[in-house]
Amino acid sequence: MDESGVGRSVAARPAWLRGVVRALPIAAGYVPIGFAYGVLARQGGLSLFNAVAMSVIVYAGSAQLIAVGLFAAAAPAISIIVTTFVVNLRHLLFSAALSPYLKDWRKGALAAFAYELTDESFALHSAQFPVEVPPKTEVIALNATAQVSWVAGTLCGALVGGLFADVKPLALDYTLPAMFVALLVMQIRARLEVVVAIFSGLLAVGLTLLGLGHWSVILATVAGATLGLLLTRLRPSADGELA
Amino acid sequence: MDQRGVLITMLGMLVVTYLPRVLPLWVFASRSLPPHVATWLRFVPVAVLAAMLLPSLVLVEGRPSFGFDNLFLWAAIPTFVVAWKTRSLFGSVIVGMVLVAGARFVIGIG
């Protein structure tokens, strides 16, 4: 090991390692939540294989937790699939929002990237891509590290089952909320974005209270982005960089 | 449902999860978007992060909660300040976690 490693610039690391390191805040949140999912999946009657398989092939935290509840309640397959569709529909917006930055990528690379697009990986990429799109290796390594941590958490939870470790003393359950706070702050480059953030956030709270459940995030996002577009058109000079 | 049925259901879940993830990238990445659409998309990240975050901070079990026992909400304020001043993702996350863990340890709330 290089003794002067502390002082080395981040850019000197290989691309894959940069991706792994950038994924660490996600991993710190995914391992305990994946663990909780693994425990619940086994309690809900899923085999060890199926519990882990869902983290590998579906890989969508909140939808997996909801599905486990539905499997346990013996819900019909079609209602589990439709619920999953509604809960995960927000990925449509993530995918569309990142598309302008990945024009140079081939369909195969986009397919691999999209497979591991989650709330958290989207949050990191959407903060990074406008500044500079990192090499493909770094982007894919970041995504893969996040999913590996999710699957590892799942496997541990599914194996130990009832021996539920408490994540609260280490505040691991606050990793992802804190990350979202920081990434939201980093999205703010102009006053208009403050307006959009406050509007969308309050609207999502209101719609949730009205009982719109998982639609509230999608509706609040569409309304917020539309407000941003309208304000940009109304006063193109106020936020020149956005026009 | 037996384990085989669970697995088949999960394949259906895979399809309805993966298509929204991949189709916009496949359709949009290869062409230049009309300016209005491009501008609209540029507001999506800030809108969707706020829409996911605020309900998770303000609502506890589906109801607004502004008391001091809502640790996630109050810890978000110093986390916000650190993120604003330092622009450091790791730093902000560490500060948030230390505050929540500390409050739980010292005051025993949350």
Image (tube, coloured by chain):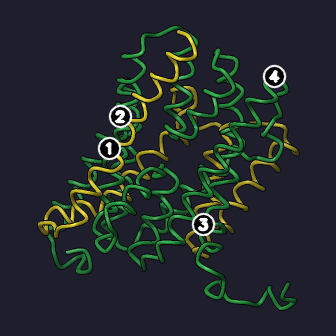
Chain colours: A green, B yellow
Provide the residue designation for mark 3: B81
Relative to B98, residue A70 above or below: above
Q: How far separated are the C-alphas under marks 2 and 1? A: 7 Å
Kindly identify which chain the residue marked by label 1 belongs to.
B
Provide the residue designation for mark 4: A162
Packing grade of label 3 (10 A; few <14, some 14-19, many >=20) is some
- Secondary structure of the residue carrying tag 1 is helix
| A172 to the left or right of A109 | right
Q: How far separated are the C-alphas under marks 2 and 3? A: 39 Å
Give the residue type that dot 2 points to.
Val
Residue at image position (34%, 38%) is A89
Packing grade of label 4 (10 A; few <14, some 14-19, many >=20) is few
Relative to A192, residue A236 above or below: below
Marks 3 and 4: same chain? Answer: no
Provide the residue designation for mark 1: B20
Marks 2 and 1: same chain? Answer: yes
Provide the residue designation for mark 2: B16
- Secondary structure of the residue carrying tag 3 is helix
Q: How far separated are the C-alphas under marks 1 and 4? A: 35 Å
Residue depth check, mark 2 versus mark 3: number of the one nearer the observer: 2
Residue depth check, mark 4 versus mark 2: number of the one nearer the observer: 2
Give yes or no for contact between labels 1 and 3 (Cβ–Cβ under 8 Å): no
